[in-house]
């Protein structure tokens, strides 16, 4: 896929966020375990795997990580 075929063309949703190194590792591990994307987000939020203070920030970061990693599949 080249950059012009990207579903995120013209959108800064993924590039405006932080790099999320540790969060990406955690999310990637869950993806490698074969868990579905929605379940990954629910697990990260319910168990506070990112150790963030609010549920809203956890869910936003988890969604970004899942979207970024889904592009690599």
Image (cartoon, rainbow, N blue to C red):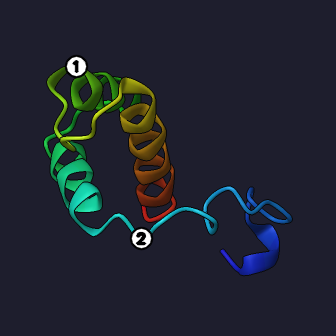
Secondary structure, mark 2, is loop
* Vertical side of 31 occupied by 73: above or below: below
User: Quadrant of residue 44 in the image?
Assistant: top left
Residue 1, image quadrant: bottom right
Label 2 neighbour load within 10 Å: few <14, some 14-19, many 20+: few
Q: Residue at x 16, y 38 (%)?
A: 49
Residue 46: mark: 1
Left or right? Give the position of 40 relative to 66.
left
Residue closer to the observer: 73 or 66? 66
Tag 2 near tag 1, CB within 8 Å: no
Give how far across and how far down residue 13 sits, in percent.
Answer: 68, 56
Q: Give x and y (percent) for residue 27.
A: 26, 49
Residue on which the image places disc 2? 19
Judge whether 13 appears above or below 63 on screen: below
State the residue at coordinates (35%, 64%).
Answer: 20
The answer to whether residue 61 is above or below residue 9 is above
Give percent across and percent down for residue 23.
26, 55
Q: Secondary structure at mark 1?
A: helix
- Quadrant position of residue 30: top left
Furthest-bottom residue in this view:
2
56 sits to left or right of 17: left
Q: Which mark is residue 54?
A: none
- Identify the residue shown where x is 15% and y is 52%: 29
Q: Earlier in the sequence, mark 2 or mark 1?
A: 2
Q: Position of residue 25 (x, y in %)?
A: 20, 61
């Amino acid at each position: 896929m080249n950059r012009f075929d990207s579903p995120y063309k013209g959108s800064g949703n993924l590039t405006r966020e932080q790099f999320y190194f540790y969060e990406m590792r955690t999310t990637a591990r869950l993806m490698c375990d074969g868990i579905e994307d929605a379940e990954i987000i629910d697990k990260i939020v319910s168990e506070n795997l990112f150790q963030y203070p609010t549920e809203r920030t956890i869910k936003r970061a988890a969604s970004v990580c899942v979207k970024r990693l889904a592009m690599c599949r």
